[in-house]
Image (cartoon, grey):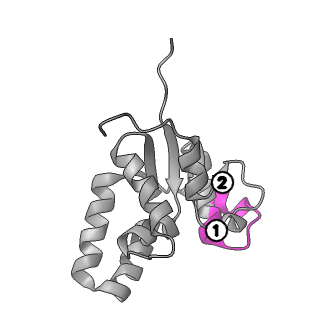
Amino acid sequence: MGEIRSMNVLLDINVVLDVFLNRSEFLADSAAVVQANHEGRLIAHVSAASLPTIFYIVRRNAGLERARLVVIECLNSFHIVPVARSTLELACTLPAPDFEDNLQMACGIEAQMDALVTRDPTGYPSSSVPVMLPAQAMAQLAPKPPGV
Protein backbone atom coordinates (compact mmCIF):
# COMPACT_ATOMS: atom_id res chain seq x y z
CA MET A 1 0.00 0.00 0.00
CA GLY A 2 1.41 3.44 -0.98
CA GLU A 3 2.25 6.17 1.47
CA ILE A 4 -0.29 8.97 1.73
CA ARG A 5 1.33 12.24 0.69
CA SER A 6 0.45 15.39 2.60
CA MET A 7 -1.27 18.09 0.60
CA ASN A 8 1.04 21.06 -0.13
CA VAL A 9 -0.87 24.33 0.11
CA LEU A 10 0.07 27.95 -0.35
CA LEU A 11 -1.61 30.13 2.27
CA ASP A 12 -2.92 33.48 1.13
CA ILE A 13 -2.08 36.43 3.37
CA ASN A 14 -5.67 36.68 4.64
CA VAL A 15 -5.57 33.17 6.12
CA VAL A 16 -2.32 33.89 7.97
CA LEU A 17 -3.60 37.23 9.26
CA ASP A 18 -6.87 35.67 10.46
CA VAL A 19 -4.84 33.53 12.86
CA PHE A 20 -2.21 36.01 14.00
CA LEU A 21 -4.64 38.93 14.37
CA ASN A 22 -7.30 36.70 15.96
CA ARG A 23 -9.99 37.76 13.46
CA SER A 24 -12.91 36.09 15.22
CA GLU A 25 -15.21 35.93 12.18
CA PHE A 26 -12.70 33.79 10.25
CA LEU A 27 -10.51 32.34 12.98
CA ALA A 28 -11.96 28.83 13.30
CA ASP A 29 -11.43 27.78 9.67
CA SER A 30 -8.06 29.51 9.23
CA ALA A 31 -6.76 28.22 12.57
CA ALA A 32 -7.83 24.69 11.60
CA VAL A 33 -5.57 24.90 8.53
CA VAL A 34 -2.63 26.16 10.60
CA GLN A 35 -3.26 23.42 13.18
CA ALA A 36 -3.35 20.77 10.45
CA ASN A 37 0.04 22.07 9.33
CA HIS A 38 1.41 21.68 12.87
CA GLU A 39 0.00 18.15 12.99
CA GLY A 40 1.60 17.26 9.65
CA ARG A 41 -1.76 16.65 7.97
CA LEU A 42 -0.87 19.23 5.33
CA ILE A 43 2.25 21.18 4.45
CA ALA A 44 1.64 24.92 4.54
CA HIS A 45 3.71 27.35 2.53
CA VAL A 46 3.73 31.14 2.32
CA SER A 47 5.23 33.28 -0.39
CA ALA A 48 8.37 35.18 0.54
CA ALA A 49 6.58 38.22 -0.88
CA SER A 50 3.81 37.81 1.72
CA LEU A 51 6.05 38.31 4.75
CA PRO A 52 6.61 42.08 4.36
CA THR A 53 2.86 42.61 3.96
CA ILE A 54 2.08 40.41 6.96
CA PHE A 55 4.66 42.33 9.01
CA TYR A 56 3.22 45.69 7.92
CA ILE A 57 -0.40 44.80 8.69
CA VAL A 58 0.39 43.17 12.05
CA ARG A 59 2.57 46.15 13.04
CA ARG A 60 -0.26 48.57 12.22
CA ASN A 61 -2.78 46.50 14.17
CA ALA A 62 -0.76 45.05 17.05
CA GLY A 63 2.59 46.82 17.26
CA LEU A 64 6.19 46.30 16.23
CA GLU A 65 7.09 43.54 18.69
CA ARG A 66 4.04 41.45 17.73
CA ALA A 67 4.87 41.93 14.03
CA ARG A 68 8.40 40.64 14.58
CA LEU A 69 7.11 37.64 16.52
CA VAL A 70 4.58 36.83 13.79
CA VAL A 71 7.25 36.83 11.08
CA ILE A 72 9.44 34.56 13.22
CA GLU A 73 6.46 32.25 13.79
CA CYS A 74 5.81 32.16 10.02
CA LEU A 75 9.45 31.27 9.39
CA ASN A 76 9.29 28.53 12.03
CA SER A 77 5.90 27.13 10.97
CA PHE A 78 5.65 27.38 7.21
CA HIS A 79 7.76 26.55 4.21
CA ILE A 80 8.74 29.72 2.36
CA VAL A 81 8.20 29.82 -1.40
CA PRO A 82 10.87 31.97 -3.04
CA VAL A 83 10.02 34.79 -5.41
CA ALA A 84 12.43 34.96 -8.33
CA ARG A 85 12.43 37.08 -11.44
CA SER A 86 10.66 34.21 -13.24
CA THR A 87 7.90 34.31 -10.60
CA LEU A 88 7.39 38.04 -11.12
CA GLU A 89 7.42 37.65 -14.90
CA LEU A 90 4.84 34.87 -14.69
CA ALA A 91 2.67 37.02 -12.41
CA CYS A 92 2.69 39.74 -15.09
CA THR A 93 1.08 37.33 -17.56
CA LEU A 94 -1.75 36.13 -15.31
CA PRO A 95 -5.31 37.45 -15.78
CA ALA A 96 -6.32 38.71 -12.31
CA PRO A 97 -6.35 42.50 -12.00
CA ASP A 98 -4.52 42.43 -8.64
CA PHE A 99 -0.76 41.91 -8.99
CA GLU A 100 -0.43 40.49 -5.46
CA ASP A 101 -3.03 37.82 -6.28
CA ASN A 102 -1.20 37.06 -9.53
CA LEU A 103 2.05 36.76 -7.60
CA GLN A 104 0.43 34.25 -5.21
CA MET A 105 -0.81 32.24 -8.21
CA ALA A 106 2.66 32.37 -9.80
CA CYS A 107 4.23 31.11 -6.55
CA GLY A 108 1.70 28.29 -6.45
CA ILE A 109 2.44 27.34 -10.05
CA GLU A 110 6.23 27.45 -9.74
CA ALA A 111 6.23 25.58 -6.42
CA GLN A 112 3.73 23.02 -7.79
CA MET A 113 1.28 23.48 -4.94
CA ASP A 114 -1.73 21.20 -4.64
CA ALA A 115 -3.92 24.18 -3.69
CA LEU A 116 -3.97 27.85 -2.82
CA VAL A 117 -5.94 28.40 0.39
CA THR A 118 -7.67 31.77 0.64
CA ARG A 119 -10.81 33.40 1.95
CA ASP A 120 -11.14 35.27 -1.36
CA PRO A 121 -11.30 32.74 -4.19
CA THR A 122 -12.68 35.40 -6.55
CA GLY A 123 -9.19 36.96 -6.57
CA TYR A 124 -7.89 33.93 -8.46
CA PRO A 125 -9.87 33.63 -11.69
CA SER A 126 -8.82 30.80 -13.98
CA SER A 127 -6.02 29.72 -11.66
CA SER A 128 -4.26 26.56 -12.80
CA VAL A 129 -3.66 25.79 -9.12
CA PRO A 130 -6.89 24.72 -7.36
CA VAL A 131 -8.19 27.48 -5.10
CA MET A 132 -9.91 26.50 -1.85
CA LEU A 133 -11.48 28.13 1.13
CA PRO A 134 -9.90 27.01 4.42
CA ALA A 135 -12.90 24.75 5.17
CA GLN A 136 -12.62 23.13 1.73
CA ALA A 137 -8.93 22.41 2.30
CA MET A 138 -9.75 20.81 5.65
CA ALA A 139 -12.39 18.62 4.00
CA GLN A 140 -9.70 17.24 1.66
CA LEU A 141 -7.52 15.99 4.53
CA ALA A 142 -7.46 12.60 6.15
CA PRO A 143 -9.14 12.53 9.57
CA LYS A 144 -6.98 13.46 12.52
CA PRO A 145 -5.42 10.36 14.07
CA PRO A 146 -6.74 9.42 17.53
CA GLY A 147 -4.86 11.01 20.38
CA VAL A 148 -3.50 13.92 18.31
Q: Dot 1: what SS?
A: loop
Question: Residue at the spot x=31%, y=85% of the render?
Answer: 62
Residue at the disc numbered 2: 131
- In front here: 41 or 123? 41
What range of the chain is rendered magenta?
Answer: 89-102
Looking at the picture, how far across and down is residue 19, in whole percent? 40, 68
Of pointers 1 and 2, the one earlier in the residue sequence: 1
Which residue lies most toward the top here?
1
Q: Would you place residue 119 above or below residue 128 in this image?
A: below
For the residues labelled 1 and 2, the Cα–Cα distance comes to 9 Å
Looking at the picture, how far across and down is residue 110, in whole percent? 58, 46
Question: Residue at the spot x=50%, y=61% of the render?
Answer: 29
Q: Which is the main secondary structure of the residues drawn in magenta?
A: helix
Q: Would you place residue 130 above or below residue 29 in this image?
A: above
Looking at the picture, how far across and down is residue 26, in whole percent? 50, 70
- In front here: 145 or 44? 145
- In front here: 64 or 134? 134
Residue 67 shows in the view: yes
Q: Characterize the local packing of mark 1: few (<14), some (14-19) or many (20 or more) Cα atoms within 10 angstroms.
A: some
